[in-house]
Amino acid sequence: MNVDHEVTLLIREIKRLGTAQPNGTTVVKFGVLFNDDQVANIFEALVGTLKAAKKRKIINYDGEILLQRVHDNVDVILLKETL
């Protein structure tokens, strides 16, 4: 799969699982995203896709890398809904 396609799928999943904010962003906890069965079936390397989306300024989260359990309560913020 190419990165653009995976980032597009990530945007869709964050919108599905997240909560829309008054400022126009959508927020989902990393743990919710990581533990979702549909997300697990779509992404072979969720953390890599998150890093690619962050680098493109599509999403934002605190830190460099997110790890299961350790960062379950970290907000993943969807900044843009398109590439």
Image (cartoon, rainbow, N blue to C red):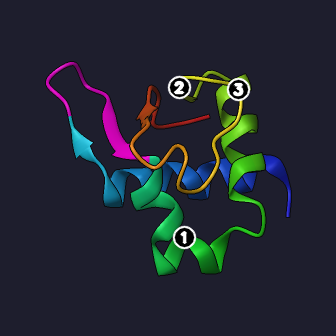
Magenta residues, start to end: 21-29
Kindly report the distance in space between the C-alpha atoms of the residues bearing marks 2 and 3. Answer: 10 Å
Which is nearer the N-term, disc 2 or disc 1?
A: 1
**Mark linked to residue 39:** 1
Position of residue 34 measured from the top left corner of the image (x, y, whole percent) = 53, 62
Pointers 2 and 3 in contact (CB under 8 A)? Answer: no
**Crowding at label 2, few (<14), some or many (≥20) Cα neighbours within 10 Å?**
some
| Residue found 33% across the figure and 38% down from its top | 27
Using the image, determine if residue 29 lies above or below residue 40.
above
Q: Tag 1's secondary structure?
A: helix
Q: Amino acid at mark 3?
A: Glu
In the image, farthest residue toward the left: 22
Task: Identify the image quadrant of residue 46.
Answer: bottom right
Name the residue carrying label 2.
60
Name the residue carrying label 3.
64
| Residue found 70% across the figure and 26% down from its top | 64
**Crowding at label 3, few (<14), some or many (≥20) Cα neighbours within 10 Å?**
few
Position of residue 45 measured from the top left corner of the image (x, y, whole percent) = 77, 61
